């Protein structure tokens, strides 16, 4: 009996690349590939972020739409050089099937460029696109479209690689990286237009798109604004759902099918800030976008939809004493509160009365004077800061979270972390559509593109 078991194991794994989850050989031979694949990535989205969104929006008995997907897996996320990944290494693993070092985009640990599944789809004659609420040059979308050694300094280079790539849809933020300041005095947008791209800059222009074969939309100099702040700021930015709808309208013209990556990048940013209210709003827009896409997919039922995360951020959880209603009543993101504080502070360091008044105006919380003094000290301390321009918002978020007993990592962990508070917690994957049953069990993040390549008969 033992000999038979060993022989079966040897035969079953021989034809396939190394994949963490068990694969049924006969099922792979019988199934036909889906026409289209859409990957939704909630950047920084762990089970805690999902629970926060569910309870804030629907209560303890409700559920998000993604919870209705029939197949669920857990994903391990470590990078090549760290037990805690950053977005660059995580997205590179999801896009290429190769573990790499933190901060590396689209390259292996030795610096060699590697093709992504988006590249594979494009080479096979299919249409491809990316959509994000972050910059289109940021780590997650860039891992599908480019190869650079350093995610932050490499964003202008990613913009040039996007120009050379001829990918069909590019929608998100990051306009500044295409302009003269970052491109040696040259504006890249006219070059995109010469290559046949329709260029749009706001919600109205995007909504009017109907016949474009190739589309680039850049809706903010940096990241798109948090959903929580958009009405207050009166932005002209499109929602994630509109960007996704328009991307599909362009891509579905392909008779050979398409690949689309959609990222809700600001889930991660809200989590870094311990900003539960912004996180809630970003998660709900993400979930509604997925539901809208699922409804579109019911026309032909030939699209595989995968919803996953690259990593978890800040150990979010719903605690027993957490004051959910007070968190829901907060009217602005911590990023917005920080911007108001910086605009109204005429003197440096910050004045306690001004800080206290502004925080109360938007959060409804009357912070004790002693804690205000400590907050100012934390906001002006330069030690251990990963991204200095986010420091004030991060500190405000941590203070509000602690006052309302919200479950999140201590601020000191964030500042001692090279990733700004990522964790190595496994993250969820939800799958729907043709062959979605293959995405189950406990997977490594590198398994995702390997399975897709097997399903689509693409080179591994």
Image (cartoon, rainbow, N blue to C red):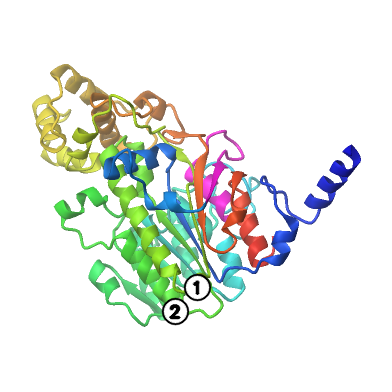
The spot of residue 376 in percent (x, y) is: 21, 25
Mark 2 surroundings within 10 Å by alpha-carbon count, few (fewer than 14), some (14 through 19), many (20 or more)? few
The spot of residue 345 in percent (x, y) is: 12, 35
Task: Please tell me which residue is depicted at 33% across the width and 40% down the height of the picture.
Answer: 61
Residue 157 drawn above or below residue 59: below
> Considering the image in quadrants, where does the C terminus appear?
bottom right
Asked which quadrant contains residue 398, the reply is top left
Of 164 and 55, the residue lying toward us: 55
Q: Is residue 432 left or right of residue 357?
A: right
* Mark 2–mark 1 distance (CA, rounded to whole Å): 8 Å
Residue 113 appears in the picture as rendered: no
> Considering the image in quadrants, where does the N terminus appear?
top right
Counting every numbered tag in the picture gives 2
Q: Residue furthest top?
A: 370
Question: Is 81 in the magenta?
Answer: yes
The spot of residue 66 in percent (x, y) is: 42, 52
Task: Specify start and end residues of the magenta stretch as a single range.
Answer: 71-96
Proximity of marks 2 and 1: CB atoms separated by less than 8 Å: yes
Residue holding disc 1: 166
Residue holding disc 2: 195
The spot of residue 278 in percent (x, y) is: 27, 43
Residue 376 drawn above or below residue 336: above
Task: Please tell me which residue is depicted at 42% across the width and 75% down the height of the picture.
Answer: 250
Q: Earlier in the sequence, mark 2 or mark 1?
A: 1
Mark 1 surroundings within 10 Å by alpha-carbon count, few (fewer than 14), some (14 through 19), many (20 or more)? some
């Amino acid at each position: 009996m033992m000999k038979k078991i060993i022989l079966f194991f040897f035969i079953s794994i021989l034809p396939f690349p190394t994949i963490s989850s068990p694969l049924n050989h006969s099922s792979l031979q019988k199934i036909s590939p889906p026409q289209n694949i859409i990957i939704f990535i909630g950047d920084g989205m762990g089970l805690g972020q999902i629970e926060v969104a569910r309870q804030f929006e629907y209560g303890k008995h409700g559920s998000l739409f993604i919870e209705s997907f029939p197949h669920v897996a857990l994903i391990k996320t470590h990078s090549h050089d760290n037990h805690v990944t950053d977005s660059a290494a995580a997205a590179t693993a999801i896009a290429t099937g190769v573990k790499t070092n933190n901060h590396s985009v689209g390259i292996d640990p030795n610096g060699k460029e590697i093709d992504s599944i988006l590249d594979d789809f494009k080479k096979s004659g299919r249409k491809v696109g990316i959509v994000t609420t972050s910059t289109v040059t940021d780590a997650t979308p860039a891992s599908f479209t480019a190869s650079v050694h350093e995610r932050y300094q490499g964003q202008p280079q990613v913009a040039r690689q996007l120009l050379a790539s001829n990918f069909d849809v590019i929608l998100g933020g990051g306009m500044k990286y295409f302009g003269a300041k970052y491109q040696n005095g040259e504006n890249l947008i006219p070059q995109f237009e010469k290559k046949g791209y329709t260029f749009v800059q706001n919600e109205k222009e995007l909504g009017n798109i109907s016949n474009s074969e190739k589309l680039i939309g850049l809706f903010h100099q940096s990241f798109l604004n948090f959903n929580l702040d958009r009405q207050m700021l009166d932005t002209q930015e499109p929602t994630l759902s509109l960007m996704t709808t328009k991307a599909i309208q362009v891509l579905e013209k392909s008779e050979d099918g398409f690949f689309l990556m959609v990222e809700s990048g600001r889930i991660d940013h809200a989590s870094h800030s311990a900003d539960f209210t912004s996180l809630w709003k970003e998660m709900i827009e993400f979930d509604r976008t997925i539901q809208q896409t699922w409804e579109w997919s019911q026309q032909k039922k030939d699209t595989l939809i995968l919803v996953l995360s690259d990593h978890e951020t800040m150990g979010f959880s719903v605690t027993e004493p957490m004051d959910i209603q007070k968190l829901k009543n907060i009217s602005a993101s911590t990023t917005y509160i920080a911007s108001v504080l910086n605009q109204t502070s005429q003197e440096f360091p910050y004045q306690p009365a001004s800080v206290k008044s502004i925080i109360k105006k938007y959060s409804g919380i009357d912070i004790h004077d002693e804690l205000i003094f400590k907050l100012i000290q934390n906001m002006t301390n330069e030690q251990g800061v990963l991204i200095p321009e986010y420091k004030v918002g991060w500190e405000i978020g941590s203070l509000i979270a602690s006052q309302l007993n919200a479950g999140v990592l201590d601020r000191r962990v964030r500042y001692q972390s090279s990733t700004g508070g990522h964790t190595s917690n496994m993250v969820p994957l939800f799958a729907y559509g043709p062959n979605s049953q293959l995405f189950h069990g406990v997977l490594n993040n590198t398994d995702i593109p390997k399975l897709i390549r097997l399903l689509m008969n693409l080179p591994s």
